[in-house]
Amino acid sequence: MLKTVVFIDSDCLGSGDDDLGGALMLAAIKNMPEAGMIPSHIIFMNSGVKLVAAENPALKDLQRLTEAGCDIISCGTCLDWFDMQDSFAVGRRGTMIEALNLMDNAEHLVKL
């Protein structure tokens, strides 16, 4: 069984103000290691895949998580939808079946 899988389906955390939600998501990703949380996997879907783009401020923190052993997976359909096939800069392309299997086998599933 996998330790912790984090599921991120938006580039914003919470609903209401998108600017605040974007800042909260960046803070959550940045502070995972400081909080003692190195997930085994982070799965990005829907607009969450925008966080893995080369120009996104989350990139440096996601690269740190990868270096610490976290497997970063972005939904292939979502990358295609946002025309990001060549612009994602961290992690790898994944499938819905892989994401469902990872979430099903997780000891802890965290949705941000």
Image: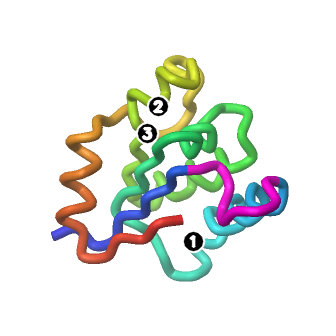
Q: Is residue 57 left or right of residue 14?
A: right
Q: Indicate the quadrant containing the C terminus: top left, top right, bottom left or bottom right.
A: bottom right
Give the magenta-colored segment's residue range: 10-18
CB-based contact (under 8 Å), mark 3 and mark 2: yes
Please tell me which residue lies in front, 1 or 12: 12
Which badge, 3 or 1, comes first in the chain's sequence? Answer: 1
Judged left or right of residue 102, residue 63 is right
Q: Residue at x 32, y 36 (%)?
A: 94
Q: Which mark is residue 74?
A: 3
Place residue 42 in its image quadrant.
bottom left
Q: Residue at x 65, y 72 (%)?
A: 31
Q: CA distance from mark 3 to mark 2?
A: 8 Å
Calculate the distance from the C-alpha at mark 3 to the C-alpha at mark 1. 18 Å
Q: Earlier in the sequence, mark 1 or mark 2?
A: 1
Whole-percent x and y of residue 100?
Answer: 24, 51
- Disc 3: CA contacts within 10 A as few (<14), some (14-19) or many (>=20): many
SS class, disc 2: helix
C-alpha distance separating marks 1 and 2: 24 Å
The quarter holding residue 22 reads bottom right
